[in-house]
Amino acid sequence: MANFAVQKETETWNVAQGYINLKILLHLVELDKLVKIAIYGTERIEDSVYMSEEFKKLFRLEAIKRLIDSLLLIIENTKFVMGKETEGTIIDLKDRIQNVKLLIDPIEKKKFDQRTGKSEIDINEEHFSLSLTELRDIKTELNLPLNKHSLIFPSSDEVDLEKYKEQLMYGG
């Protein structure tokens, strides 16, 4: 009977770990990519050489919008784990994200040149920079309650270095 209990706990942990990897950690990694794209218009240096300034602007605008959505998604995916002690922080972060979302439209200015028949996009860089800074601050602050609830690093102080070494070496 005890063996069944250990197996059941292991299965639950494995499911929880899978959820954390797919629904939280994957999005945290995506946030870093989106920040790079919002700043540079592309994640990779090589791409920026060949990409037109117009496409870089489009990608920067899209990245900041997705950054907002991804931050909200992480909060939604972790809300059920957060305790009362972090509830106020999470509500505050979500409100701040919503405020940036409400003010995001004036960042983008579309112009149409009737002479050439082409549309151009212009970015209000000051507004964009302030919005991106706020979102990056929120991203940083969100890590604290996530980690407090062991959604980033395990809460256990014990680390099996041999097991960790094997995982690194053999992909286990």
Image (spheres, helix red, strand yellow):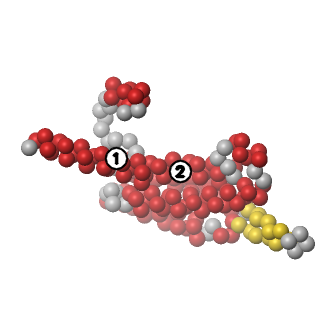
Identify the residue under disc 1: 17
Quarter of the view holding residue 156: top left
Mark 2 neighbour class, 10 Å CA radius: few under 14, some 14 to 19, many 20 or more: some
Judged left or right of residue 124, residue 141 is left
- Please, what is the three-letter code of the amino acid marked with disc 1? Gln
Task: Count up the numbered dots.
Answer: 2
Residue 50 visible in the current orientation: yes
Residue 14: give x, y in percent of width and height.
30, 45
The residue drawn where x is 79% and y is 66% is 120
> Is 19 left or right of 1, judged from the image as shown?
right
* Residue at the limit of the structure toward the left, as seen here: 1
Q: Residue at x 38, y 42 (%)?
A: 153
Front one among 38 and 9? 9
Q: Horizontal and vertical percent for residue 109?
A: 74, 68
Q: Residue at x 89, y 69 (%)?
A: 116
**Mark number displayed over residue 30:** 2
**For numbered disc 2, what is the local secondary structure?**
helix
Res 170 → quadrant:
top left
Residue 55 is situated, as x and y percent measured from the top left of the image, at: 73, 57
150 over 70 or under it: above or below: above
Where disc 1 sits, the SS reads helix
| Mark found first going from the N terminus, 1 or 2 | 1
Q: Residue at x 71, y 67 (%)?
A: 108
Whether the residues at callouts 1 and 2 have beta carbons within 8 Å, the answer is no
Identify the amino acid type marked 2.
Glu
Tag on residue 132?
A: none
Tell me where residue 150 appears, x and y as whole percent.
35, 46
